[in-house]
């Protein structure tokens, strides 16, 4: 009399297969329970969220000049924007551009001239001046644009 769980063809008998399936199912059902953990720490993360709206730098005074293909914009005053500690000048190729050709960030007290080499047609270049408020976390709030136009270069 045979006691093996295999049939004569070498495959497991129906009983042995059923036992294997039930064992596998039990392991799969019970295994997640073994991995369960209880977290009891009461610490929470801090998240501060805020919005800041920076006004246009009203009172900005600028003049532009050309020397060949070099366009120079000179600011004698960036105007006043509450909370702004720096300013951004965005120079566009033409009035239809949505992305500036040049972006120059300056500290509030840096009134040194901005000179860029322009290409393309000889036409006045639109520009924006915006107040900047850099934060400790590395983010920078960018203010509303004050538009201007340079001389043709």
Image (cartoon, rainbow, N blue to C red):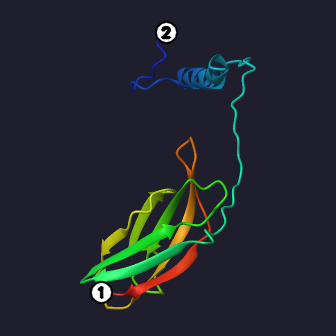
Seen from the viewer's position, the closer of residues 126 and 16 is 126
Specify whether residue 146 is in view: yes
- Kindly identify which numbered label has been placed on residue 9: none
Q: Is residue 92 visible?
A: no
Q: Residues within 10 Å of mark 2 (few under 14, many from 20)?
A: few
> Would residue 47 appear left or right of 71 to someone viewing this image?
right
Q: Quadrant of residue 151?
A: bottom left
Cα gap from disc 2 to disc 1, whole angstroms: 93 Å
Vertical placement of 130 versus 41: above or below?
below
Query: How far across and how far down the image is residue 87, in percent?
Result: 52, 61
- Of badges 2 and 1, the one in the foreground is 1
- Secondary element type, mark 1: loop
Mark 1, residues whose alpha carbon is within 10 Å: few (<14), some, or many (≥20)?
A: few
Label 1 belongs to which residue?
A: 120
Q: Is residue 121 above or below residue 131?
A: below
Earlier in the chain: of badge 2 and badge 1, it is: 2
Is 71 in front, or is 110? 110
Q: Is residue 25 left or right of residue 62?
A: right
Residue 130, quarter of picture: bottom right
Residue at 63%, 63% in the rendered image: 80
Q: Is residue 59 above or below residue 19?
A: below
- Work out whether 36 lies above or below 143: above
User: The residue tagged with tag 2: helix, strand or loop?
Assistant: loop
Query: x, y (%) of residue 90?
Result: 46, 71
Q: Which residue is mark 2?
A: 3
């Amino acid at each position: 009399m045979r006691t093996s769980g295999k049939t004569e063809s070498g495959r497991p008998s129906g009983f042995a297969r059923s036992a294997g399936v039930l064992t596998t199912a039990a392991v799969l059902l019970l295994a997640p329970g073994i991995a369960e953990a209880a977290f009891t720490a009461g610490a929470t993360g801090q998240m501060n969220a805020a919005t800041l709206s920076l006004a246009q730098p009203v009172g900005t005074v600028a003049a532009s000049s050309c020397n060949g293909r070099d366009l120079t914009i000179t600011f004698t005053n960036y105007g006043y924007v509450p909370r702004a500690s720096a300013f951004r000048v965005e120079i566009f190729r033409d009035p239809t551009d949505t992305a500036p050709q040049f972006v120059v960030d300056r500290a509030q007290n840096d009134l040194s001239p901005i000179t860029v080499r322009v290409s393309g047609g000889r036409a006045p270049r639109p520009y924006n001046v915006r107040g900047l408020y850099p934060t400790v976390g590395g983010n920078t709030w960018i203010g509303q644009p004050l538009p201007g136009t340079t001389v043709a270069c």
